[in-house]
Image (spheres, rainbow, N blue to C red):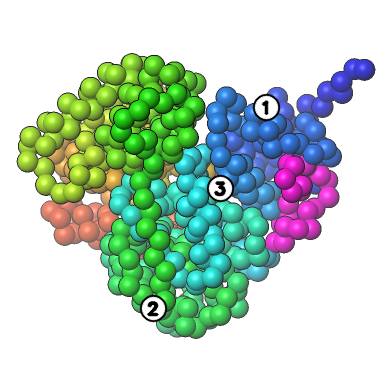
């Protein structure tokens, strides 16, 4: 019997999937998918109308890598959201319990779509990537939010709070009727901006009405999950916001991440521990070592970057690296790429030297802070000159940024655009920054701890003033464009595009007017921001 080969272009619903080109189109518009989601969709499309087993899907998206089943569920959830965003009706991926999934021309009636005015909010999630070693924690958070309306994930910086919260948010968005909204609070400057940020994400322009009243009124008609990420620097405002929203609504749940508890009413706190490391003593095989989440993450990240494979002879060294880094996920991810270019014993030796030099300088603070700082410094020392310059310049952005914006800021280094793009690729491969898709653009993002570390380097290198000036001129161009587009775009679309950039405008104005910057440039920024100030009632 001759096996039937799938066609090069596979149709389902309004979509066309070009297998050879790895492109998904809805009409003439391209649907942007992450690499894993695309691999899963292609595997499902090649057997459209048939059940594809979980094993086959694992082999398609994570070949040669042992990962947890939760990653498959999260990636399928992300894929379903992308299809619902474009089809406006529902998902074409059906679930067969305990067996697998299939792709159909018919909508999956088990995947309800909330078509209300706020329905687009549940698609605005940062790229999650592969989650390793947190399946128990993700399950615990899901159980907790099912019975508690306010839950806070608490833990040290770099321990993976955002990762766990995002995984839960994506699973809820895929499997429940809740509107799921993710609000990144890391980029806001002060507590007075917490409520405006939530309103902007929800697309609420409240006019003269109290903004918290407007948010509460809208949410009172929703079944929703709000995910408030990185709350520690605005903790009092977040606690107040949660108290008010929960008092005025019946079907809203809130999930927060913070380095400390909110101390809000009826708050349930879940402490996130480091990843598990094998106990000292004893000899383990590679299979036994990978039963612990810390080595599993370290080896998994190295495998994703360059097909690294853990050999029994390296198990002891790998375990010692994990122990030295206290099982901190961020630290493990930052050094994973080094296993591809040097023996594990050399990686451990260089790491020990870095710790010794740090402690010798009298560094204060808890050991976990030594670990993170040491890892960041060690990772920075391994960057090329161009990568280091781009990393420092990237710290001027409070949130995600486009390559075009970065090119404006790194101009003082006389780097060609090709050098900048190569540096971005290098930083991505070394886990110093991540990628997320927004509309049809690729945006880059620094982790909070990495941004703070790079910002200190930017100032120490004497580059802060030039970078701030270039950043302020870039922001001025953005809002001059906004002023023109206000009369060209629908009001709601204009608001959605520019309301989330208010912190960029504030940062540029603060430098220009109050930090020995450029007074004339500052006045221009204030003037060009007037349409946005008016819309935000500020």
- Which tag is nearer the camera, tag 2 or tag 3? 2
**Drawn side of residue 83 relative to residue 386, left or right:** right
Residue 21 image label: 1
Q: Circle 3 sits on which residue? A: 439
The answer to which of marks 2 and 3 sits earlier in the sequence is 2
Along the viewing direction, whichever of 360 and 285 lies nearer the viewer: 285
* Residue at image point 48% right, 68% down: 254
Q: Secondary structure at mark 2?
A: loop
Q: Which residues are magenta?
A: 88-113
Measured in 3D between alpha carbons, the distance from the residue under mark 1 to the one under mark 3, in whole angstroms, is: 20 Å
Q: Is residue 223 left or right of residue 165?
A: right
Q: Residues within 10 Å of mark 1 (few under 14, many from 20)?
A: few
Q: Position of residue 426 (x, y in %)?
A: 38, 26
For the N terminus, give its image quadrant: top right
Q: Quadrant of residue 328?
A: top left
Q: Which mark is residue 265?
A: 2
Q: Main secondary structure of the magenta part?
A: loop
For marks 2 and 1, the one nearer the N-term is: 1
Residue 74 belongs to the span the image colors magenta = no
Q: How far is disc 2 from disc 3 in space, using C-alphas?
A: 37 Å
Task: Return the x and y of residue 131 as percentages of the image width and height.
Answer: 50, 42
Asked if residue 104 is among those painted magenta in the image, a careful observer would answer yes
């Amino acid at each position: 019997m001759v096996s039937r080969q799938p066609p090069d272009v596979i149709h389902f619903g309004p979509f066309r999937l070009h297998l050879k080109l790895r492109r998904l189109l809805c009409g003439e518009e391209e649907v942007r998918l992450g690499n894993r989601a695309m691999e899963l969709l292609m595997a499902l499309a090649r057997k459209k109308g048939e059940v594809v087993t979980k094993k086959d899907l694992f082999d398609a998206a994570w070949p040669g890598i042992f990962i947890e089943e939760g990653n498959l569920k999260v990636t399928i959830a992300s894929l379903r959201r992308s299809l619902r965003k474009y089809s406006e009706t529902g998902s074409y991926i059906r679930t067969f319990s305990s067996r697998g999934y299939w792709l159909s021309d018919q909508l999956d009636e088990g995947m309800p779509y909330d078509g209300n005015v706020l329905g687009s909010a549940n698609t605005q999630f940062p790229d999650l990537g592969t989650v390793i070693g947190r399946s128990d924690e993700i399950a615990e958070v899901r159980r907790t939010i099912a019975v508690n309306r306010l839950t806070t994930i608490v833990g040290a910086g770099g321990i993976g709070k955002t990762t766990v919260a995002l995984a839960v948010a994506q699973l809820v968005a895929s499997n429940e009727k809740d509107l799921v909204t993710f609000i990144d609070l890391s980029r806001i400057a002060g507590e007075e901006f917490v409520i405006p940020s939530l309103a902007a994400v929800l697309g609420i322009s409240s006019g003269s009405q109290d903004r918290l009243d407007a948010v509460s009124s809208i949410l009172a008609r929703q079944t929703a999950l709000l995910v408030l990420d990185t709350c520690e620097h605005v903790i009092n405002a977040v606690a107040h916001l949660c108290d008010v929203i929960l008092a005025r609504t019946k079907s809203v749940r809130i999930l927060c991440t913070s380095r400390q508890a909110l101390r809000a009413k009826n708050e349930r706190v879940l402490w996130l521990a480091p990843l598990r490391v094998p106990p000292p003593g004893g000899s383990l095989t590679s299979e036994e070592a990978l039963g612990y989440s810390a080595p599993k993450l370290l080896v998994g990240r190295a495998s994703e970057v360059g097909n690294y494979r853990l050999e029994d002879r390296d198990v002891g060294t790998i375990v010692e690296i994990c122990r030295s880094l206290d099982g901190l996920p961020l630290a493990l991810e930052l050094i994973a790429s080094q296993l591809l270019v040097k023996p594990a014993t050399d990686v451990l030796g260089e790491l020990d030297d870095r710790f010794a030099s740090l402690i010798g300088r009298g560094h204060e603070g808890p050991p976990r802070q030594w670990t993170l700082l040491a890892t960041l410094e060690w990772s920075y020392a391994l960057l090329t000159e161009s990568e280091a310059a781009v990393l420092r310049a990237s710290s001027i952005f409070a949130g995600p940024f486009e390559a075009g914006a970065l090119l404006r800021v790194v101009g003082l280094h006389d780097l060609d655009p090709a050098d900048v793009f190569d540096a971005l690729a290098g930083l991505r491969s070394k886990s110093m920054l991540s990628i997320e898709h927004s509309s049809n653009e690729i945006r880059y993002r620094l982790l909070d701890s990495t941004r703070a570390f790079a910002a200190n380097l930017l100032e120490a290198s004497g580059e802060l003033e030039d970078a701030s000036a270039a950043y302020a001129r870039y922001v001025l161009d953005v809002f001059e464009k906004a002023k023109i587009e206000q009369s060209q775009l629908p009001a709601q679309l204009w608001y959605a595009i520019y309301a989330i950039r208010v912190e960029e405008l504030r940062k540029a104005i603060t430098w220009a007017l109050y930090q020995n910057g450029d007074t004339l440039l500052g006045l221009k920024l204030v003037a060009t921001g007037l349409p946005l100030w008016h819309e935000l009632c500020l």
